[in-house]
Amino acid sequence: MSLVKTIKVAVVVACSALAVSFSATSSFSKPADAGDQKKATQPASTKNSTEDFVGSETCKTCHEDQFNSFAKTAHAKLSKAGWKAEKQGCESCHGPGKAHVEGGGDKTKIRTFENESPKQISEGCLQCHAGKEEHNNYKRGEHWRNDVACTDCHSPHFTKHLAEKLAGTPQGKTDAPSSLLPVGPFSAHSNDLAPPKMLVKSEPQLCMTCHNETKGQFTQPFHHRVLEGAMKCSDCHNPHGGFESKQSRLNTGADAACMKCHADKQGPFVFEHAPAKVEGCVICHSPHGASNAKLLKRNNVNQLCLECHSNVALAQGDIEAPGTPSFHNQANVRYQNCTTCHAKIHGSNADKTFFR
């Protein structure tokens, strides 16, 4: 057998072994409890015939307020997209309503979600939404593991009135809630429109409901302009899970989320700055906000550089980074800002010491 054929056979065998091992392994996230799995409601289309569906207009007879709000959502527009009758309208989530109607509104004969766990509720949403790349890794995410249901962030019956009830009236009114509303020049109209994706609140208000530590970070003197409305949390993080730490949106290489805006720092460079490639941007920068310019973790640039480029660390063998030259007197102001000379600190195509 030739060398090429041998390599091809080896690749095929390796891929087959990986596929078998992956299929035999459960999700990386903590699975739902056995009790939850037994109680989970199966999709209506697999258990009932089309005759069991009565249509959303029938639901309107008793649930007019919910119907009117639902009619304004993206889910209500599925009929125009040619979806099957059982996959659109109220019954796509609540199941067939024939028995419920014939029972005089008996709640036990329709899915109400009242006594279901967060994982059960999310499983219902994933019957339709699991096929998209954005949601494929939801069960690997922290929200799934910590019992955050889809309906904790999204509202199937969303309306502008509900937005005002949950998020508060537009900023500028005397009864406006204070701290989590956007602070940009257009914040007076922050709640005039319903948030996208049927969110119960607009970003970042929704994320900061749980991740309230980020509020203080985004109010630092130097920060990414999230509160001003120039960015959203989901620009850098995927709330529906992923493989990376902090559910960062990393596609190719390190810190792809940062490189979407800071493309000039991506490279590849002839002379790479190793920490930027190995440990990423966060080894030097605080991504949400900092009291130091350029979101640096240290007040002085030399203090940050000396964490790696220290003769003491080099002598002990902890770090293999080049030590600080003897003529770099740190008491001298001219040597306290390393990037004055080492201007291309993220990588250079001309000089291995990152000179300009």
Image: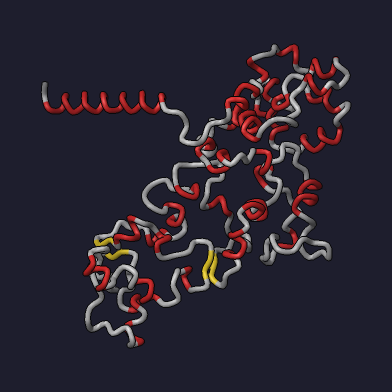
Vertical placement of residue 54 versus 308, above or below: above
Vertical placement of residue 297 versus 94, above or below: below
The residue depicted at 27 percent of the width and 27 percent of the height is: 14
Q: Can the viewer see residue 123?
A: yes
For the residue pair 339 and 122, the one nearer the viewer reads as: 122
Extreme-left residue of the structure: 2
- Position of the C terminus, as image quadrant, is bottom left
Extreme-bottom residue of the structure: 332
> Left or right: where does residue 104 sit relative to residue 144?
right
Task: Specify the quadrant of the image occupied by residue 77.
Answer: top right
The residue depicted at 78 percent of the width and 19 percent of the height is: 109
How many marks the image carries: the answer is 0
> Residue 21 in the image: x percent, y percent?
36, 26
> Residue 43 in the image: x percent, y percent?
64, 21
The residue depicted at 25 percent of the width and 62 percent of the height is: 271
- Position of the N terminus, as image quadrant, is top left
Q: Can the viewer see residue 351?
A: no
Task: Specify the quadrant of the image occupied by residue 91.
Answer: top right
> Left or right: where does residue 207 sit relative to residue 29?
right
Task: Specify the quadrant of the image occupied by residue 269.
Answer: bottom left
> Residue 227 in the image: x percent, y percent?
63, 62
> Residue 195 in the image: x percent, y percent?
69, 48
